[in-house]
Structure formats: C-alpha cells, structure tokens
Amino acid sequence: MIDARSRYVTDTVATVGPARLLTMLYDRLLLDVDRAAESLAAGDRAAGTSQLQHAQDIVAELMSSLDERVWDGGAQLMEIYRYLFTALVDAAVRADPERVAECREVVEPLRAAWHEAALATAAPLPVAAVPAAPGAGLLGVG
C-alpha cells in the first residue's frame, strides 16, 4: 500500500519540468552527502553508507540522462560525474568523512549553478496565476 507522502512525491516528480527535476536531484544529492557526513561523524557507518549509496544512485541517474553531444560542456560534465561517482563509492567503502567532504565540495557548486540556470530559464508566472486568497501561505495553504 502506498502512503500519502510517497504518492505525493511520486506525483510531484512525474509532473515537474526537466529543469525543476534536475534541481530536485541536486538538492537530494547534497542532502544525502550531508546526511552521510553527519552519520559517519556520529559513528554510524551503516547509515552513512546507505546515504552514500543513494547519492551514487542519483549520480548514476545524472550520468545516464546526460547526452554529451548536446552541448560543448557535456563531456566535461560527464567526467565530473564519473569522478564524483568514484569518490562516493570510495567514501562508502572506507567510511571516510574527508572523502565525503570532498564530494560535497564537488556537488555544492554544481547544485548552485543548476539552480541559477533553472531560474534564468524559468518563465515568470502571470500575476493572475498567483492565488490571492487571504491568509493563504506558500502553495495556497494557511
């Protein structure tokens, strides 16, 4: 049985555009790396390894979806992904917090760059599309 949160996440991922999906992947990748660092610092190797394995899955997805021929930087980005994947595996095998920190140093600027690119290419919403319900907060809930 699928719980409501899983259904919401699945539906959200299925309906977002490519730029938003990419930024979501990078957000989760950074979260996984940070959680792995926290777990390893606390001495919880199993949790750290689990987070690093999930990060590896995300990088593998980024690699499989990258068409190196589409733009001039494609081959270089693929090399970064390959390096990052190898570093994540190595960090997990050795439970090495320094290697995890090194991975974070690679992920953070890429995440920031993709967020900036997504914002630059996003079309602004027309004013009429923004709900004006009194007391409504983000996403229309109070």
Image (cartoon, rainbow, N blue to C red):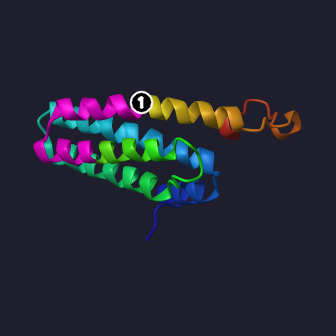
- Quarter of the rendering occupied by the N terminus: bottom left
Q: Residue furthest bottom?
A: 1
Residue 16 at x, y percent in the picture:
63, 52
Residue 105 at x, y percent in the picture:
34, 28
Q: Residue drawn at (83%, 40%), measured in percent from left and top?
A: 129
Horizontal relation, residue 135 to residue 110: left or right? right
Within-10-Å neighbours for mark 1: few <14, some 14–19, many 20+: some
Instruction: In the rendered view, tell whether residue 62 sits above or below residue 35.
Output: below
Instruction: In the rendered view, tell whether residue 110 sits above or below residue 86.
Output: above
**Which of the 4 quarters of the picture holds residue 40?**
top left
Q: Which residues are magenta?
A: 86-107
Residue toward you, 43 or 3 = 43
Q: Residue drawn at (72%, 38%), measured in percent from left and top?
A: 122
Residue toward you, 40 or 98 = 98
Is residue 112 at least partly visible in the picture?
yes
Instruction: In the rendered view, tell whether residue 2 sits above or below residue 142.
Output: below
Question: Would residue 100 be counted in the magenta stretch?
Answer: yes
Total of numbered circles in the picture? Answer: 1
Q: Residue drawn at (50%, 57%), measured in percent from left and top?
A: 65
Instruction: In the rendered view, tell whether residue 68 sits above or below residue 97.
Output: below
- Quarter of the rendering occupied by the C terminus: top right
Q: Residue drawn at (30%, 47%), measured in percent from left and top?
A: 85
Residue 128 at x, y percent in the picture:
88, 37
Residue flagged by tag 1: what amino acid is it? Glu
Is residue 141 at least partly visible in the picture?
no
Horizontal relation, residue 104 to residue 77: left or right? left
Disc 1, SS: helix
Horizontal relation, residue 82 to residue 48: left or right? right
Residue to which mark 1 is pinned: 108
Residue toward you, 138 or 23 = 23
Residue 140 at x, y percent in the picture:
71, 39
**Which of the 4 quarters of the picture holds residue 35?**
top left
